[in-house]
Amino acid sequence: MAIFIMAMTINPNAKKVHHDLSHHVSESLDVFAATKVKVQSLYATLGRYDYLAVFEADDQSIAFKVASAINGKGILETETWPVIPYEEFTRLIQ
């Protein structure tokens, strides 16, 4: 399985429209459970992004599907990166 990191920010328009934002964020994050991905870690952050998820998916197309579904809810905006362990990367460039 491939590993991905998804950085998420709360859509500025959602902040203006939804008073119970935590409920809507949770509903957006439920997309992970409804798809064929395995979430390794989910974090709330202080900084540029509001949330970070590390997850495994069979391939990049499934990661795209998850990101599109989360974005489609209109609460979170995502940025998703495929990643590999550092040790594997160093073997590739040797």
Image (tube, helix red, strand yellow):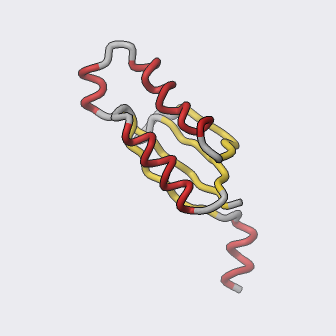
**Left or right, 63 with reference to 11:** right
- Relative to 34, is 15 above or below? above
- Image-quadrant location for residue 10: top left
| Front-lying residue, 83 or 17 | 17
Quadrant of the drawing holding the N terminus:
bottom right
Q: Residue at x 70, y 63 (%)?
A: 85
**Residue 50 x/y as whole percent:** 45, 35
**Residue 21 x/y as whole percent:** 39, 19
| Front-lying residue, 65 or 6 | 65
Q: Residue at x 70, y 76 (%)?
A: 90
Q: Single out the residue that lies furthest toward the bottom.
A: 94
**Left or right, 28 with reference to 91:** left
Total marks placed: 0
Q: Single out the residue that lies furthest toward the top.
A: 19
| Front-lying residue, 35 or 79 | 35
**Residue 92 x/y as whole percent:** 69, 81
Q: Residue at x 37, y 32 (%)?
A: 75
- Relative to 80, is 83 above or below? below
**Residue 13 x/y as whole percent:** 25, 30
**Left or right, 30 with reference to 21:** right
Quadrant of the drawing holding the C terminus:
bottom right
Q: Residue at x 44, y 40 (%)?
A: 70
- Image-quadrant location for residue 93: bottom right
